[in-house]
Amino acid sequence: MWLPSRWLKYGLPFLVAIFIQSPVGCKKEPPKEKRLLAPDFTLLAVDGKTVTLSRLRGKVVLLDFWATWCKPCRLAIPHLNDLYKAYQKSGLEIIGVSLDKGSPERIRRFAVNIGVQYTLIMADDEVIRKYGISPIPTTYLIDRDGYISNKWIGFSQNLMNNITTEIERLLSQEGA
C-alpha cells in the first residue's frame, strides 16, 4: 500500500498518538473531585408531595426537563415510561421537571391523560438557572452518589439508546 510521504510524516504519527491516548471502547470515569455534584432542590410534585433530589442518593436519577407544549418532550414520554418500568426495581428514579407555568393540577391532568408513570415536579427559576436549561427536552443522568453522569439535549431514538446504555452502566456500579 502506497502512502504519500506527507501522510507518513504528519498524519500517521498523529493517528497513532490519538489511538494510544484514547483506547477504543473504554470510558474512563473522571475522579470524583472533577465531577459535578447535581444541584440539590426541593420542589413540589404534581401529586402534592415534595421531592428533594439529595434524598434520592443511592438511586440512579434521570431528570427530564420538559413542557407540555414541547412536541419532542411529549414524544419522549413513552420511552421514559418504558425505562421506568424496566429499571425502577433496579434503582432508577425518573423525575420529569415541568417548565410549564400554571397550576400543578393542570400538569397532573395532562400526565394522567397521556399516561406518565414517573414522578413529575414543577420547576422554579432557580432550578432552571442551576441546571442551565435553555432548549428542551434536556435530560440529566445522575449517579448513585449524586454526581452528574451525562447530559443530553433533544430527543431521538438513538439518544434514547444512549441513555439506556448509560443507565445500565450506572445501575451495575456500586455507589452511595
Image: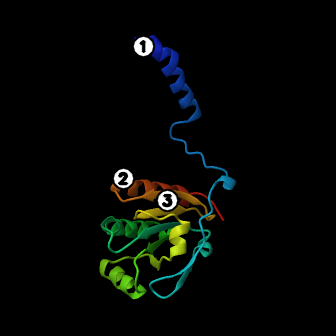
List x then y, in percent, for residue 80: 39, 67
List x then y, in percent, for residue 56: 59, 73
Q: Which residue does the numbered mark 1 point to in the structure image?
A: 3
List x then y, in percent, for residue 85: 42, 70
Q: Dots 3 and 2: beta carbons under 8 Å?
A: no
Can you tell which of label 1 and label 3 is closer to the viewer? 1
At horizontal 51% and vertical 19% (from top left) the residue drawn is: 10
Can you tell which of label 1 and label 2 is closer to the viewer? 1
Can you tell which of label 3 and label 2 is closer to the viewer? 2
Q: Callout 2: 10 Å neighbours few (<14), some, many (20+)?
A: few
Give the alpha-carbon distance from disc 1 to disc 2, as whole Å: 36 Å
Q: Which residue does the numbered mark 3 point to in the structure image?
A: 167
Q: Would residue 92 be seen by someone viewing this image from the given angle?
A: no
Report the front residue among 139 and 60: 139
Give the alpha-carbon distance from disc 1 to disc 3, as whole Å: 43 Å
| Amino acid at dot 3 | Ile
The numbered mark, 1 or 3, whose residue comes first in the sequence reads 1
Placement of the C terminus among the 4 image quadrants: bottom right
Q: Is residue 55 above or below residue 103?
A: above
At horizontal 38% and vertical 84% (from top left) the residue drawn is: 108
Residue 158: mark: 2
At horizontal 39% and vertical 55% (from top left) the residue drawn is: 159
Q: Dots 1 and 2: beta carbons under 8 Å?
A: no
Q: Dots 1 and 3: beta carbons under 8 Å?
A: no
The numbered mark, 3 or 2, whose residue comes first in the sequence reads 2
| Amino acid at dot 1 | Leu
| Amino acid at dot 2 | Asn
Q: Callout 1: 10 Å neighbours few (<14), some, many (20+)?
A: few
Q: Is residue 41 above or below residue 1?
A: below
List x then y, in percent, for residue 82: 38, 67
Give the alpha-carbon distance from disc 3 to disc 2, as whole Å: 14 Å
